[in-house]
Amino acid sequence: MTERPGPTRYEIEIGGHASDRILRPVVDEFSIELTEAGTTRLVGVIRDSSHLNGLLAHFTSLNAEVMALRRIDRAMGVTPPTTDIESDSSESERNPS
């Protein structure tokens, strides 16, 4: 596994509405949402793989069910490239070369 350089924004979904004890390490660094589906959604910046592994170890040591872990984007303002094929083709139709 290749370690990604630099901080990256992640979403972590935990089964159930997490207790204060489970959320203690992330309360200052992550946004926390208790969803209608009965899960806890955390979004925040994870510095590196050791930070990520530490958070996951904390959750699992308290028997919290980590249901999902999603990388959202690089935290330092670098947005993943996207391609909008429809707007690219409509642009070429408006301005033929």
Image: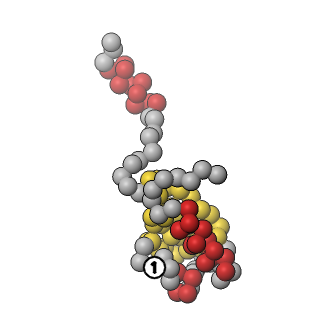
Residue 44 relative to residue 39: left or right: left
Instruction: Give the answer, above or below, for where 43 lies relative to 94.
Output: below
Q: Residue at x 40, y 27 (%)?
A: 88
Instruction: Give the answer, above or below, for where 20 lies relative to 31.
Output: below
> Where does the image place residue 76, in percent across and percent down from the top left?
38, 55
Instruction: Give the answer, above or below, for where 97 lies relative to 55.
Output: above
The residue tagged with tag 1: helix, strand or loop?
Answer: loop
Residue in front for this viewpoint, 49 or 75: 49
Residue type, mark 1 in image: Val
Q: Residues within 10 Å of mark 1 (few under 14, many from 20)?
A: few
Q: Residue at x 42, y 24 (%)?
A: 89
> Where does the image place residue 20, in percent across and percent down from the top left?
52, 86
Residue 36 visible in this rendered orientation of the protein: no
Instruction: Give the answer, above or below, for where 82 lies relative to 86.
Output: below
Question: Hey, which residue is sitting farthest left in the picture?
Answer: 95
Position of the C terminus, as image quadrant, is: top left
Task: State how the image is colored.
Answer: secondary structure
Residue 82 visible in this rendered orientation of the protein: yes
Question: Hey, which residue is sitting farthest top in the picture?
Answer: 97
Q: Residue at x 36, y 52 (%)?
A: 77
> Where does the image place residue 70, in percent across and percent down from the top left?
56, 58
Q: Residue at x 59, y 62 (%)?
A: 69
Q: How many marks?
A: 1
Residue carrying label 1: 27
Residue in front for this viewpoint, 93 or 12: 12
